Amino acid sequence: MIVSPDTERENRVPPGQHLLERWPVLHHGSVPEIDEKAWKFKLSGLVEREAVFTFEEFMAFPRVDVMSDIHCVTRWSRLNNTWEGVSTSGIKDRVSILPEAKYVMVHGARGFSTNLLLDDFFSEDVLFAVKHDGKDLTAEHGAPVRLVVPRLYFWKSAKWVTGVEFMAENRPGFWESKGYHMHGDPWKEERYSSP
């Protein structure tokens, strides 16, 4: 099991946050209905050759387990979450990423997306989760596949993932284009791009 470094802090709750036992469901609009048989995972952008995988192919990738905390921009945190899925590092050998790639845009169903620094995306504790606390993800929590980026606010853990685009320049994703911070570090309270 990979243990997120933030769980080893003496104080695990970032400034302005309060603890919850439950995992709230938060999203914009209705929950998309995703047919796993039709679902595709696309690696695109600054790669030598784009690659597309079916759900069955994606589920055959090597799995990892990660223990992390969740910190939502709406000021709640939940400790000791266990995730199972595919490490972002595990997709590195699926495509040849060009050296000018410095950022990623993680794309999800219905136009949802989030931007990340390449280094944040490939952190050891970042994964494409299919299970949470031993159970399959529900559609409300991002099934069939959601990104989990433990060290950033939870909107960066995009739901309903359909692919990753490698980019040379940073550009805002869905929430970032609506005023959320381009990076989202909860320990620095990077909630919004302007006061």
Image (spheres, grey):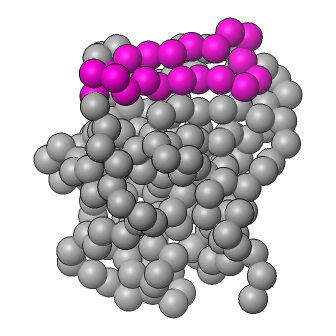
Q: Position of residue 180 (x, y in %)?
A: 66, 71
Of residues 108 and 2, the one nearer the viewer is: 108
Q: Is residue 168 magenta?
A: no
Q: Is residue 44 magenta?
A: yes
Above or below 150: residue 20? below
Residue 69 at x, y percent in the picture:
37, 65
Which residue sits at x=39%, y=81%? 76
Identified at 28% across, 31% down, the residue is: 35
Q: Residue 96 or 4: which is nearer the viewer?
A: 96
User: Picture coordinates of residue 166 (x, y %)?
Assistant: 70, 31
Can see residue 98?
yes
Q: In this view, does 95 lie above or below 3?
A: above
Q: In front here: 13 or 39?
A: 39
Report whether residue 12 is seen: no
Which quadrant holds the C terminus?
bottom right
Name the side, left or right, on which 14 lies relative to 38: right
The part of the chain drawn in magenta is 36-55
